[in-house]
Amino acid sequence: MDTKIVTLYNNKGGVSKTTTLFNLAVYLSITGKQVLIVDCDPQCNVTELFFAATEDSDSPDIDLPGTSIYQALLPRFKGQQAVIDQKSVELVPHALYQNLSLFKGDLEFARAETYFGTAWNQAITENIHEKNSYVVFERLLRALGNERSFDYILCDVGPSTGAISRTVILSCDELVIPLVPDRFCYQAVKLLGSIIKEWVDRHKIISASLVPFEITPFVGEPKLAGTVVQNFKVHSGAKAKQSYIKWQDKITQQIKTSLIGPGALTPKAEFDENNPYTASIRDVAVLAPIAQMFGRAIFDIQKEHTREASTDGSMYYGSVWTPWEERMDAYKKEIAKLAEAIS
């Protein structure tokens, strides 16, 4: 089975994209899948989260191990190599989860916005340098997946619609759209499908220009695997607040009319437009920062970690610990639904 490349993407920030991606990666890894996280966001948040499980990871005097995505691609950007050899990339294994690895991020990867942007604009010409730059990212991911036997490659990407986001998304097989039930996500969903469709259409034109130069184009048409609505708050009776329900209903309708269809994204056969939320994740409150502090999945917090949440540094037990267990279990079940959607 070929490696499946997936990203979680929304052109609106603040939708728990990185947190969800990391937890999905951990879940897949503990179920026996070989998983690679690729940090394509110059903010490097998933890299920080990944290394949080490592001793002294916060020390500014310690260089993080592994090859960064910018270091790996720079020889192509500079025109020194037509193709990047996957053997030149040193990946980093996670300190806790043995089937999970990282292709680390780099603040300097922000410079790739210019390189990929130029390739996007000039690859259709006879400029062989830009043609090779256009396909370099997808080629490298496929090579890493095939040569190192990864079942999944999960790409973390920022919320922009710039050249880096375009390159990453077109290189993926499937997308999961994280959402929060509010006005701004509703507006984002109205545009997201048509924006990505424009990228796909442009990619087809560029792909046709690659063939005469004996450069094999890639598919460049990711399918919508699912959506996840999250960060909604609930009343004591575990019902979502009415304001969240209102926006969720509006977003549901917008998914049907704007996110999928002939002028937008192509959904997987399993995607149900009448029930488009693959997973529904309520606000996890203090669990997220505690998990991030230790580089763990939210569903893998241990009792001793609750010392960081208590006012006196003592561990939680009994009736105080039980709600944590219940919320972690509920969260894990929703992440399992996302894993199933991309399987």
Image: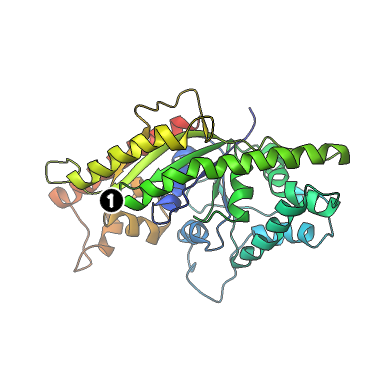
Q: Residue furthest bottom?
A: 61
Q: Nearer the viewer, residue 224 or 154?
A: 224
Which percent across, then down, holds residue 104?
59, 57
Residue plotted at (52% across, 59% down): 47
Q: Nearer the viewer, residue 111 or 30?
A: 111
Q: Nearer the viewer, residue 246 or 24?
A: 246
Image check: 70 left or right of 274?
right
Image check: 161 left or right of 131?
left
Tell me if residue 277 can be seen.
yes
Tag 1 secondary structure: loop
Which percent across, then down, holds residue 263?
54, 34
Residue denoted by label 1: 284
Residue plotted at (58% across, 65% down): 64
Q: Residue furthest top?
A: 269
Residue plotted at (63% across, 39% down): 200
Which percent across, then down, holds residue 20?
41, 47
Residue flagged by tag 1: what amino acid is it?
Answer: Val
Which percent across, then down, holds residue 268?
50, 27
Image check: 304 left or right of 115?
left
Instruction: Say above or below: 24 vs 294.
Output: above
Number of marks in the image?
1
